[in-house]
Amino acid sequence: MVRNRDPFSTALEDLRGRLTSGVYGGGAPVVILDEAKRLNLSTTPVREALAWLSGAGLVEHVSTGGYRASRIEAGIVRDRYRFRRDCLHLSLENFTGPSTPTNPLTSPEDLFDWIVGRGGDLALGDAYHRVAFHLARLRTAERHVLGDPTSAFAAMSQSLIDERIDVLGVLVREYHQERIGAAVAIAFEADQPPPDQV
C-alpha cells in the first residue's frame, strides 16, 4: 500500500469540496473521527484541515471540541453577491489583455474568474477569490431556486465575443441582482441538509 505523503492536503481538499458542494447542511456536525475513517487518515490531518476551514469560515469550532458546517445567513449571502458584483465591475473598468479567453469558459464562475484576471488588480483579485470561495457553496441552491444559468452565461459570453464590454457589465449586474433578490431563498435552500441526511 502506498502511503499518502501529504495527508493534510488530502483532508483539506476533500473536506473543502464536500463543504462547498453542500454535503453538509448549515450547522451539521463534521465528526473528526468519521471523516478520518472515510479518508483512511489519522485524526490529526483531519483536525488540522478543519481548523484551517474554520479560519476560512466554512466550519465553526464548537464548545465540545468538534466542528460543524457554518450556517448560511441571508444577509451575508446578499452582501457576498454584492461584493462579487462590485469586484467584477471594477475589473471591467480596468479590463486589459485579450478580449477573448484562450481557454474555453464553461460556467459563469469561469467567466467571472477570467474577468477578474483581466482587471490587473492583484488585491482586488485576492478579495474576489475569497468571496467566490464562499459563494461556491451556494451553486446547488442557486440552481434549485433560480434554475439553470445557461442562458445568462450564453448572453454574457456572446457579449464578450462581440467585444461589447458595456453590455457584459449590464449582464453581470443583472445576473447578480437576481441572486441578491433571491438571497433569502438561496440561503434557506443552502442551509438545509441533503435529502439523504434527513
Image (tube, grey):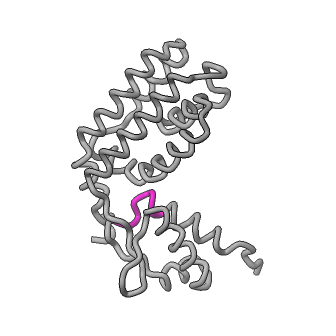
Give the magenta-colored segment's residue range: 18-25
What residue lies at 26% left-to-right and 52% top-to-bottom? Answer: 74
Q: Is residue 122 left or right of residue 27?
A: right
Looking at the image, residue 71 lies above or below residue 185? below
Magenta stretch: residue 79 in it?
A: no
Where, quadrant-wise, is the C terminus in this rendering? bottom left
In this picture, residue 24 sits left or right of residue 11: left
Q: Position of residue 78 (x, y in %)?
A: 30, 45
Given residues 129 and 111, the one toward you in this image is 129
The image position of residue 21, as x and y in percent, is: 44, 57
Which residue occupies 61% across, 19% down? 99
Residue 105, above or below 137? above
**Residue shown at the point (24%, 38%) measured from the top left:** 181
Relative to 75, say whether 124 is above or below: above
Q: Main secondary structure of the magenta part?
A: loop
Q: Residue 101: horizontal and vertical position, in percent? A: 63, 26
Q: Is residue 43 above or below residue 141?
A: below
